[in-house]
Image (tube, helix red, strand yellow):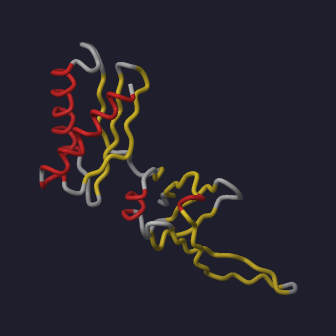
Amino acid sequence: MKEIIDKVTALLEDKFEAEEVYKDFFIVDIKMATPNRMEVFIESDSNLYIDQLKPLNRYLQEHIDEAGWMGEKYTLDVSSPGVGTLKVKRQYFKNIGRKVEIRLHEGKPESGKLLAVDEQNVTIEQEKTTKEGKKKIKQIVETVIPFDNIKQTIVKISF
């Protein structure tokens, strides 16, 4: 299965590089739940529309069918991961300004507004409460979290 995922990854990367319409697209994840079911999650640095994913689905189906990688009967789903869990660093940039919950490898989760992203870290704005005597003081602080410490990041949607 890994071999098929690697081949599909290469096909998509070539497509993204070759065609201007896909220049800001990238792969978030490719999963094979079973040998005949593949899920491909694609994201874009700008807006992503379902109409842009249909040709990618057909493109992959043509190659999979021609090479016989998954047999005659299989399911292929090409979709956006949607708003929710951020899996690759590139997704963080698109979510600057949104509220996130960051689960760490060690320690309790951190929540706040995603302010900045660089190669090594994310910066979130948090409201922290401290005690001075009997008074509780609320402060807005910026917390820098290294990517190495992040287990999972979830975008919090507020309505």
Q: Residue at x 60, y 64 (%)?
A: 111
Q: Quadrant of residue 128?
A: bottom right
Q: Residue at x 40, y 33 (%)?
A: 31
Q: Pick out the residue farthest to the top.
A: 72
* Horizontal side, residue 112 vs residue 69: left or right: right
Q: How many marks?
A: 0
Q: Quadrant of residue 81?
A: top left
21, above or below 75, in the image: below
* Horizontal side, residue 35 vs residue 137: left or right: left
Q: Residue at x 14, y 53 (%)?
A: 21
Q: Pick out the residue farthest to the right.
A: 133
The picture places residue 56, in percent across and down from the top left corner, at: 19, 39
7, above or below 120, in the image: above
* Horizontal side, residue 89 vs residue 75: left or right: right
The one of 93 and 121 positioned closer to us in this rendering:
121
The picture places residue 159, in percent across and down from the top left corner, at: 47, 59
The picture places residue 44, in percent across and down from the top left corner, at: 28, 54
The picture places residue 33, in percent across and down from the top left corner, at: 43, 25
124, above or below 72, in the image: below
Indicate the quadrant containing the N terminus: top left, top right, bottom left or bottom right: top left
Q: Residue at x 57, y 57 (%)?
A: 150
* Horizontal side, residue 146 vs residue 129: left or right: left
